Amino acid sequence: MPERQSLLENWLRTDCGLTDFTLKPASEDASFRRYFRVFLDDGQTRIAMDAPPDKEDSKPFVAIAERLQQIGVHAPQIHARNLDQGFLLLEDLGSQSYLDRLDDESADRLYGDALAALMSMQACIDPTGLPEYDRDMLVAEMSLFPQWLLQQHLALELSVTEQSMLEEAFRLLVEAALEQPQVFVHRDYHSRNLMADVTHPPGVIDFQDAVRGPVTYDLVSLLRDCYVRWPANQVDEWAWGYYQLCVQSGVLQDKHEDDFLRWFDLMGAQRHLKAAGIFARLAHRDGKTGYLGDIPRTLGYIVELAPRREELVPLAAFVEQRVLPLCLKASA
């Protein structure tokens, strides 16, 4: 048995008072955290989180969970904690994510619940004191795209013109993010981190990296998801409905109407460049190759923006003509 799992089981017995239980892996995470489902002798279950303290800081997880619960968002209850060792015992929100449940019949209901929870987070949580989603962070995220996807995964050498185009695209996307109203941002608000099989849906997980940042970031994470795709007109309809909620709640104002979809589109481009880079990094640095198949869908969103965002035409053309063919060839 791995040393960390042995320490975790000892903590569950000694500190948590669990005497008769079994552990099974609960989910894969893109970080160093591991999750186990704890089966108790009375038929109940819990989730044990193992976050090695030399690699992961669990304090933000605890702090954000408490803030979400205070406003009625269904984050997992924390039954026990040992932050020095990096162990948490959590409420089990089930094994059915939105990704497992979404289809044409369920989408409006599930997204309605997810958008209502997002509205609560943006309208009711004061983001003061959270890390800032600032220029440096936005650029660092997008830099994963050339570093890990273009260079490491595809061995693609950029021309001087292409390098200049990417730099200009990064500048444009950063400016669009920073000019938006800044709110609480979950930062990974998508179908794999929303749990469907709970009494007060959605169950919200993986929120420990929350920041103060652009109002459209979580919205585009949800509606232009790297793992599931919806027709563009349906996405626009959901996005406009959310804009109306934002105005009613005071998160946005009527004067933002002309900017909202542009912010939404450009924020999506920033996120999808970042995500494609992360997927390549997971494969080459961490040996997690399962995300490579999501890259074409993720970058495809950028290609689709070209007809209505003239400023993104050079980036979209580069992705369509130079990057996606190599991605498809690499996965063949």
Image (spheres, rainbow, N blue to C red):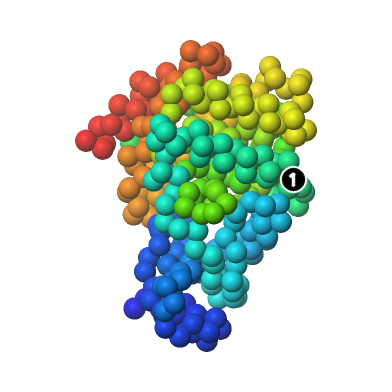
Question: Can you give x and y, in whole percent of width and height, for residue 116 in the image?
Answer: 63, 40
Q: Is residue 147 visible?
A: no
Above or below, comparing residue 131 to residue 159 in the picture: below
Task: Evaluate whether residue 216 shows in this view.
Answer: yes
Question: Which sits in the foreground, 29 or 69?
Answer: 69
User: Which residue corresponds to the image point at 37% horizontal and 38% vertical from the top-left?
Assistant: 294
Q: Say left or right for 102 vs 121.
A: left
Residue 214 locus on image (x, y percent): 66, 36
**Residue visible at 46% across and 35% down?**
107
Tell me which corner region of the image, top left, top right, bottom left or bottom right, holds residue 304.
Answer: top left
Q: Is residue 18 left or right of residue 267?
A: left
Seen at 56% across and 41% down, the residue is: 114
Decide which of 29, 281 is in the foreground and name it.
Answer: 29
Name the residue at 60% across, 54% down.
74
Check disc 1: other Cα within 10 Å, few if <14, some if 14-19, many if 20+: some
Q: Could you tell me how many numbered marks the image carries? A: 1
Q: Quadrant of the C terminus?
A: top left
For the residue labelled by badge 1, is the local secondary structure a helix, a strand or a loop?
helix
Q: Which residue is mark 1?
A: 124
- On-image quarter of the N terminus: bottom left
- Determine the residue located farthest toward the left in the rendered image: 332
Q: Nearer the viewer, residue 179 or 255?
A: 255
Residue 92: image location, x then y, percent: 49, 63
Q: Amino acid at mark 1?
A: Cys
Q: Residue 271 at what x, y percent from top left?
A: 53, 35
